[in-house]
Image: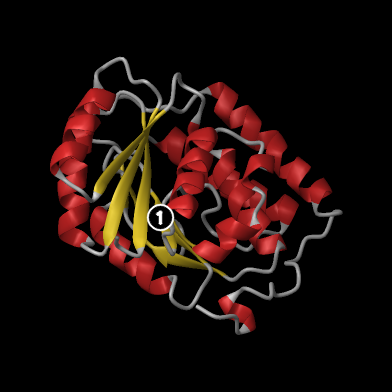
């Protein structure tokens, strides 16, 4: 078994999953891949079963219905912890995240507890987005930082690498958000627990195939989630003390 696994939620991603597996295996041979499929009506799940039969590095977790991004990642992380992986990456299935950036995230996670692929650190690196989508994303980042104090340029980014200790420490069953605010909640929770976060610059490209999952419900969830996180932290807008299992605190790798 490889030390790392890339968790990829899928819903109607039949055109993307096989090319994605090939790209991940070329770019990052030290990582396995776990797909979490929400009973995709386009046959994604059946195709993933075929890939698993021919490639021992590919795994699939089937869920009975569409339950949201956050629930998919929680299920995937719990599976990966049970399987014994030391590094758990997450990325989209649509090639908006470049598999060639995985080695840089894993490298950053050698000296940090959570490495985050950032679209906005040191500038803006987003390709093929309309201006209103870019302004919404940038505005969400500024809004999150202003309210919670979370020191990230890209708190809604979904391209990450967690060290095992982070996901073992977070109560995954208590994570409540389910849309893109899931990314904010996970990073904020790790930060408040005293884990070390680092941003790695990436280029984000709009999806190759399929349809975006963004909608008004997801936007509204994120709008209110940041306030819930602030109150959960006792209105504290700074990090918690260094966690005893954090590399930043001198914990064991």
Give the image location of residue 159, x and y in percent: 41, 52
Q: Which residue is located at x 51 percent, y 24 percent?
A: 67
Q: Is residue 220 left or right of residue 124?
A: right
Q: Disc 1 designates what residue?
A: 89
**Residue 57: x percent and y percent?**
23, 51
The answer to whether residue 34 of the structure is visible from this angle is yes
Left or right: residue 240 versus residue 107 is right
Image coordinates of residue 29 in percent, x first then y, are 20, 62
Label 1: element kind: strand
Location of residue 75 in the rendering, given as x and y in whole percent from the top left corner: 50, 39
Along the line of sight, which residue is nearer the eye, 103 or 156? Answer: 103
Residue appearing at x 51%, y 28% in the figure: 68
Decide if residue 164 is on the left or right side of residue 229: left
Question: Relative to the observer, which residue lies in front, 209 or 244?
Answer: 244
**Residue 162, placed above or below residue 6:** below
Is 228 on the left-hand or right-hand side of 109?
right
| Residue at 46 percent of width and 28 percent of height | 214
Q: Crowdedness of circle 1 by 10 Å Cα count: few (<14), some, many (20+)?
A: many
Q: How is the image coloured?
A: secondary structure
Identity of the residue furthest to the top in this view: 41
């Amino acid at each position: 078994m490889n030390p790392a696994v890339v968790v990829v939620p899928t819903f109607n991603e039949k055109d993307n999953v096989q090319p994605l597996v090939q790209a991940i295996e070329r770019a990052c041979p030290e990582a396995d891949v776990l797909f979490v499929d929400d009973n995709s009506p386009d046959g994604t799940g059946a195709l993933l079963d075929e890939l698993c039969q021919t490639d021992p590095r590919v795994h699939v977790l089937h869920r009975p219905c569409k339950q949201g991004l956050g629930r998919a990642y929680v299920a995937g992380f719990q599976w990966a912890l049970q399987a014994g992986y030391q590094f758990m990456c997450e990325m989209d299935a649509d090639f908006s995240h470049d598999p060639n950036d995985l080695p840089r995230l894993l490298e950053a996670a050698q000296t940090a507890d959570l490495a985050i692929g950032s679209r906005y650190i040191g500038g803006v690196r987003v390709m093929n987005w309309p201006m209103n989508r870019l302004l919404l994303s940038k505005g969400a980042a500024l809004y999150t930082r202003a309210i919670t104090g979370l020191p990230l340029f890209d708190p809604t980014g979904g391209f990450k690498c967690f060290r095992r200790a982070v996901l073992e420490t977070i109560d995954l069953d208590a994570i409540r958000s389910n849309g893109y605010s899931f990314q904010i909640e996970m990073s904020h929770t790790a930060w408040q627990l005293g884990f070390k976060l680092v941003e790695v610059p990436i280029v984000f490209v709009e999806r190759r195939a399929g349809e975006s999952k963004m909608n008004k419900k997801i936007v509204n969830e994120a709008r209110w989630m940041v306030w819930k996180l602030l109150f959960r932290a006792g209105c504290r807008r700074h990090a918690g003390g260094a966690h005893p299992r954090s590399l930043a605190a001198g914990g064991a790798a």
